[in-house]
Image: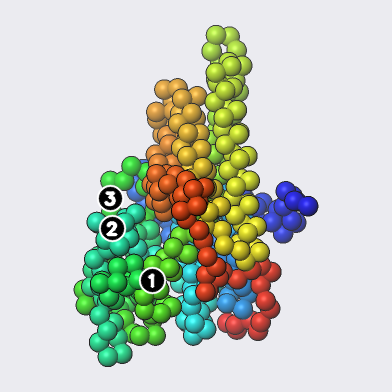
Amino acid sequence: MLNFNLSDEQVAVQKMVKEFVDNEINPYIRDWDEKGHFESSILRRLADLGLMGVCIPEQYGGSGMDYNTLAIVCEELERGDTAFRTAVSVHTGLNSLTLLQWGTEEQKHKFLVPQAKGEKVGAFGLTEPNAGSDVAAMQTSAVLDGDHYILNGQKTWISLCDVADHFLVFAYTDKSQKHHGISAFIVERTMPGFSSKAIKGKLGIRAGNTGELFFDNVRVPKENLLGKEGEGFKIAMSALDNGRFTVAAGAVGQIRACIEESLKYCHERKTFGKEIGKHQLVQQMLAKMEAGYQMSRLLVFRAGCLKNEGKRNTRETSLAKWQACDFANEAANDAVQIHGAYGFSNEYPVERFLRNSKAPVIYEGTREIHTVMQAEYLLGYREDKQLSNPLPAWPFEQKETIKN
């Protein structure tokens, strides 16, 4: 029997994150957004709450909660601002869960444990200036030289570029093999030849840290190779399953924020002698938001349930990411319309919601990529096979906990 009720533990986490957002983010986000300032102390405070490794097993320094609890955290954070949901998406979804899934025990102890505790921050380096959806077009290369790989190249649109300590970076070790010649590496900020630079002038997510990574003959130890040579594309795609899941969950929070602000304004604003909420076309926009919210939330939790069961969920996560992000973009557009001229000013947060809602429609698979994916599943052109390193099912197996 399907159970749509949150557990007591999930309700407690939801309440905790909501209060955190209301107290620590919402009072300051307008200023941070105006200044393009990423408030990195938020990550330390999230770590104090055990939320930087919320769904990482306890033996690797995490809180050991299920994958839908990660979705709840992302929903509540994006209700405040996309920048901080993005930070958790990248740190936990793209990086830490990938280490959990593909890393050796030595790599997990060295990199995953401090990340799960929030002592170190992780990021993800796949996109390049000429390689977004077309991953095989990447130019970054890694050449084996004794006990090290020599890494050269550039990544762009990398969240937490100036903040992260560890980066999962994808590079060609054999370009003649195309997708099968890509490998994954754990790169540390302190490695000589590594540098980063923030991108300014973004349309949205201005309170987030996004930019470029540069690798100039960076010597990466062989033990920092994640998986095997040539497994990089497979690792990247499995990482995107986790990242897309958190993006979809965040979009649910964006829709909820649009609903909350619109309802408040509908009761405050009066036209033609009555609250604007009494006008049917305003009600139509609100009803669309609510439908989008409920449908998106169900799609996200379905993907999370599959993750909890240890089952492949690429198809379900793709659908959730596509639909939730589109619904969020539409909800933000309608929220601005409901606010009228005031929606065009940052006196109200809905203009920020609209600007922020555009990026998730593009990153981690554009709406066009996900549309094609869903059609190919239906046509039988695409089929997902079980991965050699699946994400562990929840509840996690209990092992000896790593000591501080």
Q: Which mark is residue 200?
A: 3
Q: Alpha-carbon distance for marks 3 and 2?
A: 20 Å
Task: Choose mark 3 or mark 2, whichever is in front.
Answer: 2
Circles 1 and 3, Cβ within 8 Å, touching? The answer is no
The residue located at (46%, 49%) in the rendering is 376
Give residue 59's quadrant in the image: bottom right
Is residue 228 positioned above or below 391 on the image?
below
Query: CA separation, marks 1 and 3?
Result: 30 Å
In the displayed structure, does residue 149 sit left or right of residue 339? left
Quick one: label 2 or label 1, which is nearer the N terminus?
2
Q: In terms of secondary structure, where does tag 2 sit?
A: loop
- Tag count: 3
Determine whether, in the image, residue 356 is placed left or right of residue 155: right
On the image, numbered disc 1 is attached to which residue? 232
Q: Position of residue 34 (x, y in %)?
A: 36, 43
Q: Is residue 24 visible?
A: no
Work out whether residue 123 or residue 350 is closer to the camera in this orientation and state it: 123
Q: Which residue is label 2 attached to?
A: 131
Q: Amino acid at mark 1?
A: Gly
**Dot 2 alpha-carbon crowd within 10 angstroms: few under 14, some 14 to 19, many 20 or more:** some
